[in-house]
Amino acid sequence: MKFRSQYIWLISGLAALALVGLIVIQMSWLKGVFHEREEKLIERMDQLLQVVNHQYMAEVEVKFDLAAILQHNDAQEERQFLQAFQEMFDEVLKNEGINTSYEYGLITCKSDDFKWYTDPNQKDDIMQGHTVKLGECGQLGRLKSGEHFHFYTILPRKSLFIFKQLGLAIGSSLIFILILIGAFAYTLATIARQKKLSEMKSAFINNLTHEFKTPIATISLAARTLNRLKPEDGFQKAKTYASLIDQESKRLENQVDKILQMAVIDAGNFSLDLKAVDVHSSIRQVLDSLKLIIEKKGGQFKLDLSAQNTVIKADELHLFNIIYNLVDNAIKYSPTAPFICIQTRNSPGLELTIQDNGIGMSKAEQQQIFAPFFRSDTGDAHDVKGFGLGLSYVKKMMDAHHGNIQVSSQAGKGTSFTLFFQTPEPS
């Protein structure tokens, strides 16, 4: 079993390594595709600038007095020129299928007479961007020989534009990677749960063997002794052994009933016989059943039954078993003389608290105590018996009664269980 467990975790480790390798390869591939698209976009921008220059000469340059614009002699002419240029540039980008934000600048080449930027705060970045000479040398020759405009442009959201182009590839890759990670995580979690369940079931089988072995051995011994009795041994001696057989048979029957009861509950094939039940009456019945046991251990009960409205709608048998299991656990998990305090109060339903001075539980144990087959670490209390089904039964029965159960405990300082029941509305 140990080898198989190690083998499973070795396979899991190799699978995790393969998954990481697959993710790295996929990310590397996406990075390569991104850089390839980025280089292609740069090439497209270089080609686009030639289109911008051609459109500028054909549609913009011939319509405006560039000398007046350069000297800032006509503000309206300048505004119209810039608007016409932007409309032309928008049209070129649209025709090229480049749908992203941009910034650009228009700067005279040989002088500082004209500098204009869509965003002056980004002028340094714009000057580092793609550039093209607009028009032909000499178009502004009436002012300065060979003067011309340079056009600079950048795409600030270039990466986002490329990601949008790769949206399907990136999206599908991420989805498949997330699916793989989710499936792998679920598989590991399932393996861990199955391993834990296997350990708990092994412990359950060991407890089952122990719980059944003792009464079976006692019954067998008593039966053999009865068979060897002679008539002169007397009726009283035979009755003692018959009583012992009856007692151990009932003990066996109770253990089998617990297991069958949990099986029925887990399958959901049970129904509650709901009726008006007095919780205080059920508490006293439980205490009467456990009176001899707690007296034998030198313990005592303390009752603080303050609730006034004590009638709830419940299954009387299951309510008895719920309280019995909790009080029985309080006795079993008290290594010294048990001191068990039972309190009730209305709030506005009914709260029932069972507090003990036992070995208590750690935070980790408190999170698992309602799981089937789980048994708390008993420390020095090695004689604690059971299948680990009691608290699981209590939780499921409380849920079936639409109630709630809470636990508060500290290792070495005892445990407190609080049950919350709904009480009928007063008529």
Image: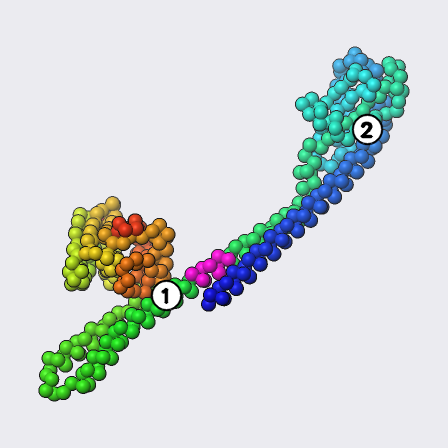
Q: CA distance from mark 2 to mark 1?
A: 81 Å
Report helix, strand or loop for mark 1.
helix
**Residue in the foreground of this view, choosing between 219 and 88:** 219
Furthest residue in direction front, as rendered: 380
Residue occupying the point 72% across, 22% down: 117
Residue 309 visible in the current orientation: no
Q: Secondary structure at mark 2?
A: strand
Q: Quadrant of residue 259?
A: bottom left
Residue underneath mark 1: 203
The crowd level at tag 1 (other Cα within 10 Å; few <14, some 14-19, many 20+) is some
| Residue 234 in view here | yes
**Picture quadrant where residue 68 is located:** top right
Q: Which mark is residue 132?
A: 2
Amino acid type of the residue tagged 1 in the rendering? Ala
Kind of residue at badge 2: Val
Point out the tag, 2 or 1, that comes first from the N-terminus.
Answer: 2
Q: On screen, 401 above or below 242?
A: above
Left or right side of 341 for 168: right
Q: Which residues are magenta?
A: 188-196
Q: Is residue 188 left or right of residue 268?
A: right
How is the model colour-coded?
rainbow
Locate residue 399, reporting x and y percent.
33, 56
Q: What residue is rendered at 64% in x and 50% in y?
A: 24
> Label 1 near label 2: C-beta < 8 Å?
no
| Residue 423 coordinates in the image, percent (x, y) | 25, 51
Does residue 134 lie above or below 1 as drawn? above
Residue 28 in the image: state x and y as whole percent.
Answer: 67, 48
Q: Residue shown at 52%/60% (left/top)?
A: 9
Q: Nearer the viewer, residue 391 or 75?
A: 391
Magenta segment includes 198:
no
